[in-house]
Image (spheres, grey):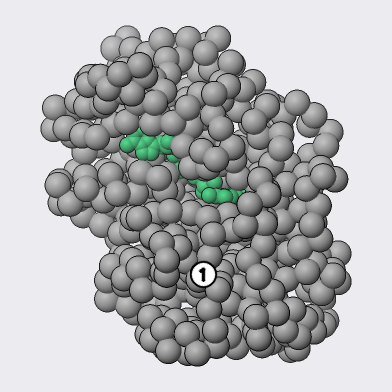
Amino acid sequence: MDKRIIIVGAGVAGINAATKLVDNGYPGELITVIDKGNDPINRLPEEVMTGMLGAGGWSDGKLTYHTAIGGQLSKYCGEEKAMELMKQVVDNFTRFHPKPDEIFMSDPQEEPEFIKPYFGLRMFPVWHIGSNFLHEIAKTWYQYLVDKGVNFLWNTEVYEIDFKNNYIEFSTNINAIREGGITYDELIFAVGKSGIDFAQKLADDYQLPNEPKSVQIGVRFEAPQKYFQKLIDVSYDFKLYQKFDNVSLRSFCTNNNAAYVAVEETYGDISYNGHAKKGKEFENQMTNFGILMEIKGIEDPFKWSRDLVSKVQAKSTGLYYSPKGTRQPGLTSEGSTVSATQISMDTLAHVVEPAFDGYFSYVMNFISDMNNVFEFGDDWGMYIPEVKYLSPEPLVNYHDLSLTVYPNVHFVGDALSARGITVSGAHGIYVAESIIRKEILIELMNMGI
Ligand SMILES: Cc1cc2nc3c(=O)[nH]c(=O)nc-3n(C[C@H](O)[C@H](O)[C@H](O)COP(=O)(O)OP(=O)(O)OC[C@H]3O[C@@H](n4cnc5c(N)ncnc54)[C@H](O)[C@@H]3O)c2cc1C
């Protein structure tokens, strides 16, 4: 095992890849992880998307365990392998958890009767790591990798990759801006959502062949938890869904008890997400979740979503609607108001609906059907938009997620259209396994076997 492996992105995918490599005896000294964010000791709570464990490091810490959730995994490796890989990710988070006994798992078994006339409910296990433990997990995990000899370059942004000559260019802002470069034998490209622009640039520069993707867009819904309690009792992280001809809708990433809405910035525009905190001091008795539509048949879904998001911005932020202005944007977990411009029914009808090309009525119908079941009346609000940018997925070899045109470059995690911790981590582990397999094969061949 003598190949130099560079991992761009110390997020969930990159860190799980590095861990699998060293766990299997790969020399840590040959692995370098480069990240534009901070190490886990210096990473600040407002650095939501960058640094050790990436977006997963400041996330809600909910590890979902179903191949239909969080992006495509079984497409590459089959159902059984996908489940095994995701379990390895859960095991890694458990292993570095300061209080593994406090991880709890919800596993609903039966679809409740009261939702049946309007919705289906996806049922699967979820491990709740607890977002306030993620920082400690990140520190212990980091120390493990450092002890194994893995090199880390923090505050270092990769801005160019020469796939033909296996060369990476980066700039680092520790002390002063410094340029640098490094060669690789194998590259694991794990830049997540915060690296989506860079991934797109590389795809354009190298004209990488890709697989078309659907659009995933909608809103983040927020209401007092009491209305949803009967469903939360059945499934903490419930996933309601509705299916129509070319549109399907699902509730996404549900947060309860101490539930906060988070602002995301991509391409200079604001969209929303959510996370939950643990600890009495954070409890606000609210529930929030995304209502996401998947729309098939949009010609250029990536461009369409980006245009849409830019149309539903006002005063340098996204929008907030509550019927008759009943509710206002909530507080963040740091105690400031979530940045969003409150709009009227009129703006909803004349700005939002056209921006969504008429598809917004599906969201409103979803909310109206929820009201039939949960009876929250006017006591709710929504942040517009929530978006999952599924940029065209580069075409990869399914056995090791390497680019079909550059077989020593592996795309993983959100950079390969994953949408969650377990699937992203599983991508990383899958690639690490394939690199180890290849190395063992080479060693055997060198030994003449
Ligand atoms: C607020 C929030 C809450 C979430 N909650 C959950 C949850 O509860 N459960 C769940 O399953 N998912 C959740 N997610 C999604 C989940 O965090 C991501 O799907 C997952 O982290 C993706 O892993 P990744 O390794 O692909 O990317 P990331 O974890 O985003 O890591 C990418 C890393 O790459 C680095 N990077 C980017 N570009 C460059 C560059 N050019 N040079 C160097 N480094 C670069 C970044 O600094 C970052 O550290 C949440 C996301 C957010 C934002």
Q: Where is residue 353 in the image (x, y as percent from the top left)?
A: 44, 86
Between 274 and 415, the residue placed more toward the observer is: 274
The image quarter containing residue 358 is bottom left
- Asked if 366 appears above or below 189 in the picture, the reply is below
Task: Bin the neighbour count of mark 1 within 10 Å (Cα to Cα): few under 14, some 14-19, many 20 and up.
Answer: some
What's the residue at 32%, 31% (across, down)? Answer: 157
Task: Give the residue number, with chain letter if any, for mark 1.
Answer: 341
Residue 432 is at least partly visible in this image: yes
Element under disc 1:
strand
- Asked if 244 appears above or below 60 in the picture, the reply is below
Residue 66 is at least partly visible in this image: no
Q: Is 295 displayed left or right of 210 in the figure?
A: right
Q: Is 397 displayed left or right of 280 in the figure?
A: left
What amino acid is found at the position of numbered circle 1 in the picture?
A: Thr
- The quadrant the N terminus occupies is top left
- The quadrant the C terminus occupies is top left
Q: Where is residue 4 in the image (x, y as percent from the top left)?
A: 31, 17
What's the residue at 75%, 26% (across, down)? Answer: 98
What's the residue at 72%, 56% (across, down)? Answer: 259
The image quarter containing residue 94 is top right
Q: Is mark 1 within 8 Å of ligand 1?
A: no
The image quarter containing residue 186 is top left
Between 283 and 58, the residue placed more toward the observer is: 283
Q: Position of residue 220 (x, y in %)?
A: 58, 67
What's the residue at 41%, 23% (across, down)? Answer: 154
